[in-house]
Amino acid sequence: MSLVLDLSGGSLPRVVHWGSDVGPLDPAGLDALRLAARPQPIGFSVDGPVEVAVLPEQSAGWLGTPGLAGNRGGTAFSTAFRVERTDTGALPPPAGGPGTVTVRATDPAAALALDLTVELTPAGLVRQRATLTNEGTTPFAVDALNLALPVPPAATELLDFTGHHLRERQPQRTAFTQGLRVRENRTGRTGYDAAYLLLAGTPGFGNRTGEVWGVHTAWSGNHRTFAERTYHSVSLLGSGELLLSGEVVLDPGAAYTTPWQYGAYGTGVDGISARFHRHLRSRPGHPSTPRPVVVNTWEAVYFDHDLTRLTELADAAAAVGAERFVLDDGWFGGRRDDRRALGDWYVSDEVWPRGLGPLTDHVTGLGMQFGLWVEPEMINEDSELARAHPDWIMAPHADGARLPRPARSQQVLDLARPEAFAYILERLDDLLTTYPISYLKWDHNRDLVEAGHRPTGRAGVHGQTRALYRLLDELRRHHPGVEIESCSSGGGRVDLEVLERTDRVWVSDCIDALERQRIQRWTNTLIPLELMGTHVGAGTAHTTDRRHTLDFRAGTALFGHFGIEWDLTSADPADVARLREWVTLYKDLRGLLHTGTSVHADHADPAYEVHGVVADDLSDAVYAVVAHGTSEMYPPGPLRLPGLDPEAVYHVRPLPPGDVPDGNAHRWGVPLPWWTPEGVHLPGRALEAAGLQAPVLFPERLILLRATRH
């Protein structure tokens, strides 16, 4: 792909082209491309062409959403930045070429300076952010600072996401018509119903087809994402932090920096995903050790913490091959239910009279890592901390006369307050120093409603988000070996900035495998599988009361960071033995699943889905064939296997234990001809173009295929 910027004329950078590769161009060729792309002057708003920069300005004739909205006591409401300095840098080998542009621009009349960075990463992502500095002698209020990337008129469809607790990241499509489509998130966290990724594409774009452009805002607080098309023949994808009224006021010399905006271009949604996954995997801090099999205690015991019961659960976990044991909520203070003691981060004398040592010793003695649940950003009014420091609770007024309405019996602890920050850091540091804790499940169970700093009374979502980042950074500096999971009532905090400080995300509190199929698929649009927490729950899902076979539950959890959230001490022995087979398969496949390319077939039958992972060298692949419901076709049509080397021959066969095609035809003793351990040998081109006949499956069933280059 190519990103071509126009830096001429002294105005802010304009995108000449963002999309498929234009090939090598010398300076004359670049000038010709710029000339060919220059819009025809039409007058009306301004004389001359309207050229929109990555930070759009009305002074350029753009009458859409401005990049900067703010004022200096009612003045300086519009800017005309002029570039003073431009620097370029190169991408590291093997990509090469110019990869970074930094621009310093000023507007003397408005007394503002802008530092803008635009990058093209080796994975082919566009990444940009801006810093606004007040160079005047009076305060400047920042209402919004948005960055934008243009997309061509051929992008006529939009795809973004909605959802709620237990049903995160549900896709929705709309036409990309003239006007403004805005997704605003005001929850104080990334949010269940955030746009997540806003994609624009050519008509009917699919998993593997069509040109697609997308943006993601790397920010864990309030944010705004929009798509805008105007009669100027300009279409934009834009985003930025959503600032509450009066939240950011720059004193003289002070500065505000936007979150990183990420842009991706590719063929199909899979092309977008591949760029994000490659980028995340290239980070120095990306998890490099095999992702351990996790057992979490929440749905097994809830608040019923008892040493004997938990040691028995740990024994059962180790017996099936678990490698990490995580003690969930209920271990601290007076926390016997979800209405009290948040903030009292001391091991409960009542439940753990000898501390956590007997349990951690038992767990580590079994060869497993020990993990612990925490929710440091929250506080219960019924807690020792709230009684001692009621002024540490975020509130809409400086005097705290009125608290926000509680949610889950919780309020928000103001981490921007130095004393509260220091207290939480000291408590977590003490726990991590005292016990052999290698993992924190970091939760965040309520939206930030009327969240203000005391004693100023100023809106505080921005400050709280920045304080969270500082807290995570400081904690990791003290304990670099500890891994942290981003959990927020399930999947409420999933973004690239929190992942700079955490090692995986909890995809959803819903472990129902049918719901998880869709939630995990669309989480995977942005996040690679090794960063997605995916667990096997009990036979009856706790959040939906729906029943599924163990193979469907475990086959769904296989595609992620595999774990178990189930009381194994009461499980049927046959289920425990079968689960052990799935754990063994996960350990065998995690090297492929967590380094390969995620692929999703475009299948016309909504009842069936094919998704999988193909090794980077195309030598190996594993696919899941999933029956969400009953097909209109009987038997179902052939299913294509995407992503393989078209010229290579592959040995395709069923993969145990996901090799049981549970359907009526199978029960009647009428096998599918090729469904044998020997399978078939076919070229990758044939497997993607013609596909394979799938077995007839009962609804809510799953089978696995392995394809190995011959």
Image (cartoon, rainbow, N blue to C red):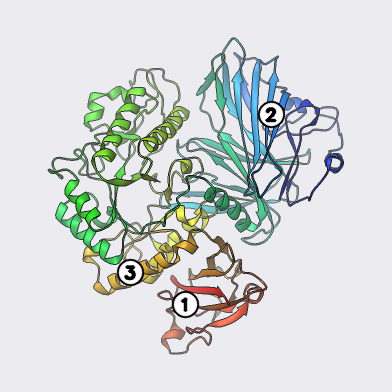
The secondary element bearing badge 1 is classed as loop
Which of discs 2 and 3 lies nearer the camera? The answer is: 2
Amino acid type at image mark 3: Leu
Residue at x 65%, y 24% (from the top left corner):
114
Residue at x 43%, y 89% (from the top left corner):
668
- x then y, percent, for residue 173: 61, 53
The answer for how far apart the CA atoms under marks 1 and 2 are is: 58 Å
Category of crowding for the residue at label 2, using alpha-carbon neighbours closer than 10 angstroms: few (below 14), some (14–19), many (at least 20):
many
Q: Earlier in the sequence, mark 2 or mark 3?
A: 2
Q: Which residue is mark 1?
A: 697
Q: Which residue is mark 3?
A: 579
Image quadrant containing the C terminus: bottom right
Horizontal side of residue 74 vs 350, given as left or right = right
- x then y, percent, for residue 20: 73, 52
Query: In front here: 335 or 647?
Result: 647
In the image, is residue 660 above or below residue 313? below
Q: Can see residue 639?
A: yes
- x then y, percent, for residue 360: 22, 49
The secondary element bearing badge 3 is classed as helix
Which of discs 1 and 2 lies nearer the camera? The answer is: 2
Which of discs 3 and 1 lies nearer the camera? The answer is: 3
Amino acid type at image mark 1: Leu
Category of crowding for the residue at label 3, using alpha-carbon neighbours closer than 10 angstroms: few (below 14), some (14–19), many (at least 20):
many
Q: Earlier in the sequence, mark 3 or mark 1?
A: 3
The secondary element bearing badge 2 is classed as strand
Horizontal side of residue 364 vs 204, given as left or right = left
Q: Which residue is mark 2?
A: 103
- Within the image, what quadrant is residue 605 found in? bottom right
